[in-house]
Amino acid sequence: MTSFNDINGVPATGNKWLMTDLLRTQWGFNGFVATDYTAINEMTAHGMGNDAQVSALALNAGTDQDMVGEIFLKNLAQNLKDGTVKQEQIDLACRRVLEAKYKLGLFQDPYRGVTEKRAKATMMKKEFIADARNISRKSLVLLKNDKNTLPLKKTGTIALIGPLANRQRDMIGSWSGAGDWKQAVSLEQGIKNVAGGVKVVYAQGANITDDQQMIERLNAHGGDLNIDKRTPEAMIQEAVQAAQSADVIVAAVGESQGMTGEAASRADISIPAPQMELLKALKKTGKPLVLVLMNGRPMALSWENQNADAILETWFSGTQGGNAIADVLFGDYNPSGKITATFPQVVGQVPIFYNHKNTGRPFNGTDKLDKYKSRYLDVSNEPLYPFGYGLSYTTFSYSKPELSKTSIKQNEPLEVRVTVRNTGNYDGEETAQLYIRDMVGSITRPVKELKGFQKVALKKGESKTLTFRLSPDDLKFYNTDLKFVSEPGDFQVFVGGNSRDVQEAAFKLE
């Protein structure tokens, strides 16, 4: 599929160098190329010409299929008459599309077994619901857990507070297609299902947002936001009263599903203001504060990290999300998820990612009075939560990596062994991550690159030795000639539970 961006000033959908010279001639791709949604039409806004001109541009570039836009349908016949495209180009595009359909068996069964009968027999099957619950709880990430606040006891009173605590619609996220959100399990219902002995005192506490313009935008596209007309002060007061009667506060906060995903950028990626005021009021009660975050992107959570006792990142966790979250909150499942994107301290650090390249003046974190280094004056360079980060109710230790060799030849694999031990009081799962760094290259190389990971289940006190295999391709990169090569020199190996907290070793490629 062609992307929406341009490459060297030419949109990808009409970029012959990209779609033909590079993709097909150099890389040997022989399948068909489809556009993204109306990408040919959108080249007119890029300033590439009218419908007829961008139609010819796309076909000549090597684009075979026009998704939705109907530019080919409406213009190719005239393009052919005008001589701006050739018959053999149209034939070749058709051939590529038809070959793909043939290989997929669509000539024999155009819908590949999709029937109403099959849908009725398949949708919401008991075993599929169980799988959805298991997948959901594996995706949850424990970001903070001071003084073992979690897991919660299945006794006493919980103040369940927040605008996302009983929202079914938001559980299934924005890109949920034909998903029936009315079948989703809310967090409130999940807690009642999992911990029936617990008394739950609920208060909404705040609206997801009080920004009327944002509410209008979200609701225009299926946001389904129901706004409480009470004043923010009245809602917070109710929530504080609920909290004062409870043993612990579980605050479900974050984003509505419509506030994230495609065409849903936010300049401010902190928790919306009315929810922040709610959290600050709840903090003042002195009760243990557990945040259940629902969101579709990394957020800036510095205040939350400093003030909450525990933080569980749940994303938009699907139809069985409420049950899955409750499973983790009450310890029926020990969280094992890891974040796949870096969380900044503040939005000003964005873009922030683990596999960045160094500047010519990297800041090493020690000489804080050295002005001329790549650093901030007001915060550290470090993220709030690094790529690959995620806690457990138990703890894990890593041995120093052992390498099968300290010097290898070109096209020779390397084995990396590390022992992971469960050093805590719960059985748990850990995802060990392997990173490398190419110390010197013909082009600048990232400070770390993820090259492998293994998830291992360990009982309390148990240890296992994991073996990673670095292949010759793991050491390669595309050089300035777009050739996939590895270069002799020194490499570092890092293994750990996230991209920051690692053990190191080194080897040389001859």
Image (cartoon, rainbow, N blue to C red):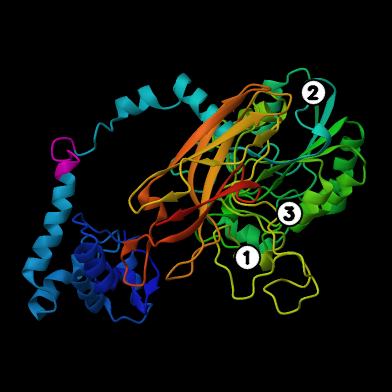
Residues under numbered marks 3 and 1 in contact, where contact means CB atoms less than 8 Å apart = no
As measured in the structure, the alpha-carbon distance from the residue carrying label 2 to the one carrying label 3 is 26 Å
Task: Give x and y (percent) for residue 260.
Answer: 57, 54
Kindly identify which residue carries mark 2: 153
Q: Is residue 186 above or below residue 472?
A: above
User: Looking at the rendering, in which quadrant would you find the N terminus?
Assistant: bottom left
Amino acid type for the residue under numbered disc 3: Leu
Q: Secondary structure at mark 2?
A: loop
Task: Tell me the magenta residue range.
Answer: 102-109
| Amino acid found under the numbered disc labelled 2 | Lys
Q: Quadrant of residue 34?
A: bottom left
**In which image quadrant can residue 143 be found?**
top right
Residue density around tag 1, few if under 14, some if 14–19, many if 20 or more, within 10 Å: few
Question: Can residue 63 be seen in this snapshot?
Answer: no
Decide whether residue 103 is among the magenta residues: yes
Residue ID for mark 3: 301
| Of the pair 360 and 409, the residue shown nearer to us | 409
The structure residue drawn at horizontal position 61% and vertical position 54%, both measured from the top left corner, is 342
Under circle 1, the secondary element is loop
Check the image and name the residue furthest to the top.
197
Q: Which residue is mark 1?
A: 350
Name the spot of residue 265 as percent of width and height, x first. Answer: 57, 62
Q: Earlier in the sequence, mark 2 or mark 1?
A: 2
Q: Which is nearer the N-term, disc 3 or disc 1?
A: 3
Left or right placement of residue 133 versus residue 150 in this view: left
* CA distance separating discs 2 and 1: 38 Å
Residue 210 included in the magenta stretch of the image = no
Q: Position of residue 264 (x, y in %)?
A: 55, 60
Q: Of the residues shown, which amino acid type is indicated by label 1?
A: Val
- In the foreground, 409 or 362: 409
Front position among marks 2 and 1: 1
